[in-house]
Amino acid sequence: MIGMRSANPTHPRFSWARSRSARVRPGVWTELALIAIGYGLYSLTRDAVPDHKTAAMHRASSVLHAEHVLHIDIELSVNHALDKITPLIVGMNYYYATLHFLITIGVLVWLYTRQPHVYRQARTVLFLATVTSLIGFYFFALAPPRYLTDHGFIDTVVKHHTWGSWATPDVDSVSNQYAAMPSDHIAWSLWCGIMLYRYAAHRWVRLAGLVYPAFTFTVIVATANHFVADAVGGALTLTAAFTAQHVVHRLRPAGERKPRVPEPASGDATVRMPSVSDTK
């Protein structure tokens, strides 16, 4: 048969599409419930992390010193340089507080609706990375650079009175301010970037996937919310999540991992070559 060209499941972009179950889109209400419950548990667990202020502040100073020794302590310079551009730093404050969630949810929805063959595995990687970060929050309470005012850091949210974050009264009572290591902003933005780069059809979207985590890194440093070390920690948690997903995938029975060529969509036009019997 000669027909419209269909996607090749053995192509790198379809490396997760190896079983029949992976191609079945899960129920939308089930997924919404899982996301809502997962985020609720994430928020409760993150905010329930012990508020070890003294230890968190001491670790922050130690991290800054270690970065100085390694010559990667760029946080203070970036913080001061971009704070001089008020519209830019205020925009970054809002970016930090909102896009972290909105873009991640948007990519999840896009995968669910347009890339169901990879949705389950991608969602699992994001879940594993988030759980790993919670472990880091619990065992390594760390203050963000904005608390190190004696080192000259500027809390850009407080200075510019940005709405909706820790400048709001009593926010410390509902959000743990010492859960900086690892950076979920980096883990989640890298996840989004990888998904967009691997599975988006348009080149400009794939390029945006590369730019998004890089710009997010600039934002978390400029607003003094994270150290460079926190970003490295976020990248490592995502790497561990991808590794765990890969190991689980390889442990599945060989029959479940055998690639299956997808059936042509109902709208695909096909042309059948005439056989000898048709000419008689």
Image (cartoon, rainbow, N blue to C red):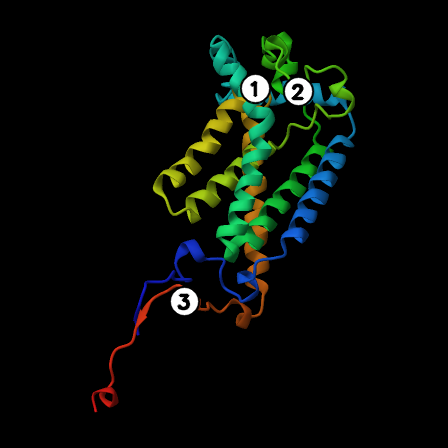
Amino acid marked by disc 3 = Pro
In the structure shown, which secondary structural element does the residue marked by tag 2 occupy?
Answer: loop
Residue highlighted by disc 1: 93
Residue 137 appears in view? yes
Amino acid marked by disc 2 = Ser
The answer to which quarter of the image holds residue 210 is: top left
Location of residue 262 with respect to 132 vertically, above or below:
below
Q: Say left or right for 144 vs 85.
A: right
The answer to whether mark 1 and mark 2 are in CB contact below 8 A is: yes
Looking at the picture, tell me which residue is in the foreground, 46 or 52: 46
Identify the residue shown where x is 69% and y is 40%.
39
Earlier in the chain: of badge 1 and badge 2, it is 1
Residue highlighted by disc 2: 165
Q: Say left or right for 132 vs 41.
A: left
The answer to whether mark 2 and mark 3 are in CB contact below 8 A is: no
Residue highlighted by disc 3: 264
The alpha-carbon separation of the residues under discs 2 and 3 comes to 49 Å
Q: Quadrant of the C terminus?
A: bottom left
Q: Quadrant of the N terminus?
A: bottom left
Earlier in the chain: of badge 2 and badge 3, it is 2
Earlier in the chain: of badge 3 and badge 1, it is 1
Residue 167 drawn at (x, y percent): 68, 14
The alpha-carbon separation of the residues under discs 3 and 1 comes to 47 Å
Amino acid marked by disc 1 = Asn
In the structure shown, which secondary structural element does the residue marked by tag 1 occupy?
Answer: helix
